[in-house]
Image (cartoon, helix red, strand yellow):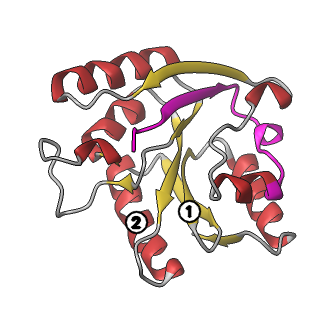
């Protein structure tokens, strides 16, 4: 399966977030969140992520330059964040997003929304472990939380100056039979 595109949305605004039922549909194969539907949103398309290491590094450098500060970047790898069993140079690495790639976006001041497929484990503890690591990688100027369905999670790494989006996600999860929230 080919790794999907990264998209950057600007400006960071809680009205950009799609309705809960639309988020839940993403986990069932819908890969587009139409940002132009949401007030003030702008889409920056970067195309499919390359599999070659050097090209992939250039891809993330260019994405960080395009996105810049006060931007929410949606990253949709096939599986999600890196796992210990797959190195960046291994076969199958294209299905993962690696920590060093996220650091480029962090250094650009971007907030992050990351698609995460679930292995066969309990959802909430797995997400808490992933969020702890994400928080450690992004640093104190970020807060992390996730919205999730029974099939997929959406991990957020938001700059602390944007709490309205966190509040909007938590509220949507509280009012949805399809979404749960964990921080």
Q: Return the x and y of residue 169 as percentages of the image width and height.
A: 74, 57
Query: Which residue is pictured at 38% across the width and 50% down the height?
Result: 139
Secondary structure of the residue carrying numbered label 2: helix
Report the residue marked by disc 1: 153
Name the outermost residue toward the bottom.
122
Report the residue marked by disc 2: 130
Query: Which residue is pictured at 37% across the width and 29% down the height?
Result: 49
21 on left or right of 163: right
* Residue 180 sits above or below residue 85 on the image: below
* Residue 130 sits above or below residue 76 on the image: below
Residue stretch in magenta: 1-21
Neighbour class for label 1 at 10 Å: few (<14), some, many (≥20)?
A: many
For discs 2 and 1, the disc positioned in front in the rendered view:
1
36 on left or right of 123: right
- Judge whether residue 39 is colored magenta: no
Q: Quadrant of the N terminus?
A: top left
On residue 99, which mark appears? none
* Residue 46 sits above or below residue 101 on the image: above
How many angstroms separate mark 2 from mark 1 (CA)? Answer: 10 Å
Secondary structure of the residue carrying numbered label 1: strand
Q: Return the x and y of residue 45 as percentages of the image width and height.
A: 55, 20
Whether residues under marks 2 and 1 lie with C-beta atoms below 8 angstroms apart, the answer is yes
Of the pair 70 and 76, the residue shown nearer to us: 76
Name the outermost residue toward the front.
1
Q: Quadrant of the C terminus?
A: bottom right
Query: Which residue is pictured at 17% across the width and 22% down the height?
Result: 54
Q: Return the x and y of residue 107 as percentages of the image width and height.
A: 37, 30
Neighbour class for label 2 at 10 Å: few (<14), some, many (≥20)?
A: some
Query: Which residue is pictured at 52% across the width and 51% down the height?
Result: 115
Q: Return the x and y of residue 125 as percentages of the image width and height.
A: 46, 81
């Amino acid at each position: 399966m080919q790794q999907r595109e990264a998209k950057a949305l600007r400006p960071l605004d809680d009205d950009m977030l799609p309705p809960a039922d639309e988020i839940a549909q993403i986990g069932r194969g819908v890969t587009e969140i139409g940002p132009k539907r949401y007030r003030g949103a702008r889409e920056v398309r970067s195309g499919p992520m390359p599999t070659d290491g050097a090209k992939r590094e250039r891809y993330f450098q260019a994405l960080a330059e395009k996105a810049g500060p006060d931007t929410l970047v949606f990253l949709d790898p096939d599986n999600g964040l890196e796992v210990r069993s797959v190195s960046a140079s291994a076969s199958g690495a294209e299905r993962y997003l690696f920590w060093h790639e996220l650091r480029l976006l962090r250094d650009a001041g971007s907030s992050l929304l990351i698609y995460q497929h679930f292995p066969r484990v309990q959802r909430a503890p797995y997400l808490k472990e992933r969020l702890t690591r994400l928080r450690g990688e992004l640093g104190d100027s970020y807060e992390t939380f996730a919205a999730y369905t029974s099939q997929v999670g959406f991990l957020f790494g938001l700059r602390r100056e944007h709490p309205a989006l966190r509040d909007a996600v938590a509220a949507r999860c509280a009012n949805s039979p399809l979404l749960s929230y964990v921080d």
